[in-house]
Image (spheres, helix red, strand yellow):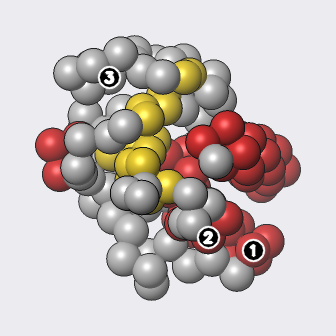
Amino acid sequence: MKKRKAAFICVHNSCRSQIAEAFGRHLAADVFESYSAGTETKPQINQDAVRIMKELYGIDMEAEGQYSKLIDEIPAPDTAISMGCNVSCPFIGRPFDDNWGLDDPTGKSDEEFRRVIEEIRKNILALKEKLQ
């Protein structure tokens, strides 16, 4: 059976969606393929997210080849998740299957990053359960 493709989308594809892609690859690769993308890109993934994911989970997103990319650079998803539209939700050519409603922790404290990272981890595990 072919695995579903899950896309995690936010505007800049530098923080929340990258964390979701990393957790998807580490916690749910047996159920779905994980991709992240945005309508704009940044020169690099959010360095606080990279640092804290390494500290907490030993996941090095950059060393594993993750980078900020546009929606048209990933395969068409079977499941599309918006990270949260506290700015404007990007248009991806189809409706989102879910909006996780997460605030962007960029520029905030490590504690705020940890809180958002934990929410994303729980959401990935719930998505895995739902798609099994």
Tell me the kind of residue under disc 1: Tyr
Q: How many marks?
A: 3
Q: Which residue is found at the position 35% from the left and 16% from the top?
A: 95
Q: Which residue is found at the position 21% from the left and 21% from the top?
A: 93
Q: Which residue is found at the position 56% from the left and 57% from the top?
A: 31
First along the sequence among labels 2 and 3: 2
Residue 41 drawn at (x, y percent) = 27, 47
Residue 14 drawn at (x, y percent) = 43, 51
Residue 111 drawn at (x, y percent) = 84, 50
Q: Quadrant of the N terminus?
A: bottom left
> Image quadrant of residue 104?
top right
Q: CA distance from mark 2 to mark 3?
A: 26 Å
Q: CA distance from mark 1 to mark 2?
A: 10 Å
Check contact, mark 1 vs mark 2: CB within 8 A. yes
Describe the element under mark 1 as helix, strand or loop.
helix
Q: Which residue is mark 3?
A: 90
Nearest-to-viewer mark from 2 and 3: 2
Q: As drawn, is 63 to the left or to the right of 12?
A: right
Along the line of sight, the residue nearer the viewer: 22 or 31:
31
Please rate how many residues cluster around mark 2, counting C-alpha atoms within 10 Å: few if below 14, some from 14 to 19, many from 20.
Answer: some
Along the line of sight, the residue nearer the viewer: 15 or 122:
122
> Image quadrant of residue 60?
bottom right
Q: Is residue 54 visible?
A: yes
Please, is residue 55 above or below residue 77 in the view? below
Q: As drawn, is 61 to the left or to the right of 92?
A: right
Describe the element under mark 3 as helix, strand or loop.
loop
Please, is residue 74 above or below residue 47 in the view? above
Q: Which residue is mark 1?
A: 57
The numbered mark at residue 26 is 2
First along the sequence among labels 1 and 2: 2
**Farthest front residue?**
1
Q: CA distance from mark 1 to mark 3?
A: 29 Å
